[in-house]
Image (cartoon, rainbow, N blue to C red):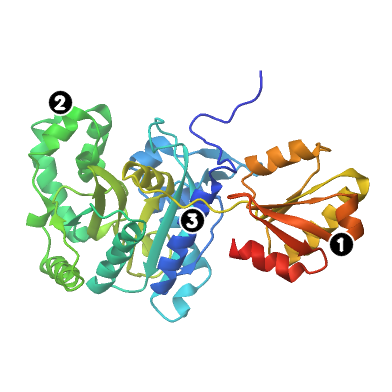
Amino acid sequence: MAIQAPKGTKDLLPADSYKWQYIEEKLRNIAAVYACREIRTPIFEHTELFERGVGETTDVVQKEMYTFKDKGDRSVTLKAEGTAPAARAFIENSLFNEAQPTKMYYFTPVFRYENVQKGRLRQHHQFGVEVFGSKEASMDAEIISLAMKAFKEFGVHNLELNINNIGCPECRSRYNDALKAYFKSRYDELCDTCKSRFERNPMRILDCKVKECKSIAKEAPIILDYVCEECKDHFEKLKNYLGALDIKYKVDPYIVRGLDYYTRTVFEIINDNITVCGGGRYNGLISEIGGKDTPAVGFGMGIERLLLTLEENNIQIPKPNHVDLYIGSMGERGKIESLKLVNILRDKKLKCECDHMDKSVKAQMKYANKIQAAFTIILGENELDEGKAKLKRMEDGEQFDINLKDLDTIVTIVNGK
């Protein structure tokens, strides 16, 4: 039996890679106009980074991480999310000494051991933006603006932005007391996971996906009633900035996000009742993993989920022309000259292909059709002796007489389609 890819992983085939390239290019361009620069972090990190940064009571740390011992008996974990590694890199490489804020983006694979379902794989890919150094609500608004603009650039307009303010550690301490008082009376109805969360981090109960727990959580106290004046002021400023940017939003007091590092602003972008992007502020993360107290804000967007969103909104990604010119050949001399010619034309940035399968001319033309070559040339003894050939446009069959030494004319015709 042939070896198959592990469950929850998926091959990206050449026939579909153009979709990813299109998405990545657009997202890079959007990030660039917001003055964000790319960061690339390792595929695995010390397990402690996620335990301390993401939070030991989260589903990610408790249930979903790919953790193992390396040959030095060190505990390492495949990247479970993108923010904590970016924060670690910010500290380790002293990026705090550069002009602030530090604005960066990344594309990264993410590894989560969870149930495989539509748009959710055990290895999926994220586009993320992280900004370190600014505590201002205007930066929260800018990050949300970037995420919203990204979807609109792809043609997705039926978006709903939900925001919440989950306060600072002091706010949450008071809120946790209120939650404990509420959930205590319903304790026996909670799932086993939420019972373990009750003492350590009752806010995590609000993020539980179990039906019974979700129903109980609907009647729980809301964080907005417990935030301090400073956090309340930050939230009011955020709403003002979103208004200034003409970004519509709805306050959802039950958004808490699934990671412990969030503070104050949290947000989700919804399309057809599916969360397609989420993020917020995480002012305590840098200090939690050993750095100086530094405010930060960011978001993550799943690439697979984005592709599904485009598909469900009937948005087609333009398919690029894979081959500009196929140069067929007859005989060994024709094969040698076609190989030489395609390599010269590749230097002139034409996407060219020739025969490497010893096919007949008829089979070569069928192959040119299959790979959707825009133009073809056949080189045989007569063409080579005369130094002339026919350049055929495959779309309509129109032919152009060409001089094989006049390569610039060939390039001009092919590029002109």
Q: Is residue 73 left or right of residue 24?
A: right
- Cα gap from disc 1 to disc 2, whole angstroms: 88 Å
Q: How dense is the environment of label 3, judged by Cα within 10 Å: few (below 14), some, or many (20 and up)?
A: some
Locate residue 377, reporting x and y percent: 75, 52
Q: Give the residue at x 82% y 60%.
A: 388
Which quadrant of the figure contains the N terminus? top right
> Where is 145 relative to 177, above or below?
below
Viewer can see residue 190: no
Label 3 or label 1, whichever lies nearer to me, is: 1
**Amino acid type for the residue under numbered disc 2:** Asp
Q: Disc 3 designates what residue?
A: 22
Question: 297 or 393, which is in the foreground?
Answer: 393
Q: Which mark is residue 387?
A: 1
Q: Is residue 114 visible?
A: yes
**Sequence-wise first label, 3 or 1:** 3
- Neighbour tally class for label 1: few under 14, some 14-19, many 20 plus, Cα within 10 Å: some
In the rendering, which numbered label is found on residue 188?
2
Measured Cα–Cα span from mark 3 to mark 2: 50 Å
Q: Amino acid at mark 3?
A: Tyr
